[in-house]
Image: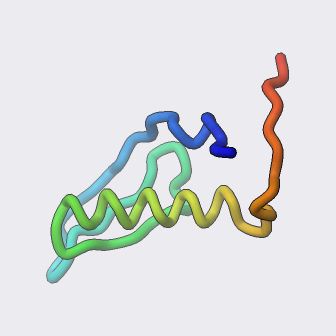
Amino acid sequence: MRDKSMDRKLTMMYWRGDRFWLGKLLEHPEVMTQGETLAELEENLKDAFRLMAMDDVPKDYKTKEIAL
């Protein structure tokens, strides 16, 4: 089962460093990484976010929408 909340859009902030493109997520500035190209940076940010968001969550997790 895939969590639909992982399909949301986030904002990538990025800039060119000496050797790599560097970036972080505006909504989650603790998620920061680099890439040789902008495309690689974007994929690395997606992977870093998924790892951070799903850290220590078992594969058989369940989801439920709740109202706030």
Q: Residue at x 27, y 56 (%)?
A: 14
Find residue 62 and report its horizontal and vertical position in percent: 82, 44
At a point 69% along the width and 60% down the height, the residue shown is 54
Q: Say which of 12 and 51 sits in front.
A: 51
Q: Position of residue 64 (x, y in %)?
A: 82, 31
Split into 4 quadrants, where in the image is the N terminus? top right
Q: From the viewer's side, name the closer residue of 11 and 39.
A: 39
> What is the quadrant of the C terminus in the image?
top right
Q: Position of residue 51 (x, y in %)?
A: 60, 66
| Relative horizontal placement of residue 29, taking residue 43 as reference (left or right) | right
Q: Residue furthest bottom?
A: 19
Number of numbered labels in the structure image: 0
Image position, residue 60 (x, y; %): 81, 57
48 is higher (above) or lower (below) than 61: below
- The residue lying at 81 percent from left, 52 percent from top is 61
The residue that appears at 84% across and 23% down in the rendered structure is 66
Q: Quadrant of residue 39?
A: bottom left
Relative to 61, residue 36 above or below: below
Say how the picture is coloured: rainbow
Q: Is residue 65 left or right of residue 42?
A: right
Say if 6 sits above or below 64 in the image.
below
